[in-house]
Amino acid sequence: MSAQHNLTGFSPKAHAWRAFFETSAVISDRMEKRLFSTTGLRLSDYNLLLLLAEAGGNQLRMGELAERMVFSPSRLSYQVKALQTRGLITRCTDPNDRRGMTAQLTEEGVAVFEEARAVHGQHIKQLFHPALDDEQAAVLQQICVQIQETVANAEAAEEEQ
């Protein structure tokens, strides 16, 4: 795979977009395959477990989880049910607001997440770290934050219309 393409007549931003898109897709695909083969988790499963593990009490409201996962509520419900079936999370009424539901890691979910985190971290070190020095990593992080802010601002502007 090479992010270098002959896109004559395209702007540097078009070249950057294609390189970003293809690189993200390749890394995600490789990491998904490796994670699934060693832990049985998909990358989206890992990300959901990560959000729960980072939350206070290993739990989040379903609405917040959907927003942070960038999932529709129905897609999140499907994924939560699959992880619930595996015994990795539970879903229950929010004790602070009986109208809402929360998802929470189980003890088994915490154990599986810790195993997956080690595997995932190893893959990041193999596939991502060698490509960047610390200065490049800081620049990439800054660029990603700028892109996320641009997307959020565009979405907010669309909602106002």
Image (spheres, rainbow, N blue to C red):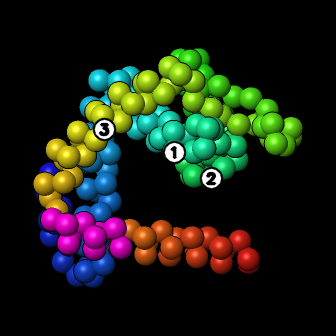
For discs 3 and 1, the disc positioned in front in the rendered view: 1
Q: Which of the 4 image quarters holds residue 19? A: bottom left
Tell me which residue sits at (47%, 41%) in the image.
50
Question: Which residue is identified by label 1?
Answer: 54
What's the distance in space between the residues labelled 3 and 1, CA to CA?
16 Å
Q: Is residue 111 left or right of residue 19?
A: right
Q: Is residue 160 left or right of residue 96?
A: left
Question: Which residue is identified by label 2?
Answer: 67
Question: Which residue is identified by label 3?
Answer: 120
Q: Which of the 4 image quarters holds residue 84? A: top right
What's the distance in space between the residues labelled 2 and 3, CA to CA?
23 Å
Does dot 2 land on a helix, a strand or a loop?
Answer: helix
At which x and y percent is residue 117?
Answer: 35, 36
Query: Magenta span covers which residues?
Result: 133-142
At which x and y percent is residue 134?
Answer: 19, 66
What amino acid is labelled 1 in the image?
Answer: Glu
Q: In the image, is residue 104 part of the stretch drawn in magenta?
A: no
What amino acid is labelled 2 in the image?
Answer: Glu
At which x and y percent is residue 146?
Answer: 43, 75
Judging depth in this view, the residue of 10 and 98 nearest the camera is 98
Indicate whether 40 appears above or below 121.
Answer: above
Judging depth in this view, the residue of 76 and 3 nearest the camera is 76
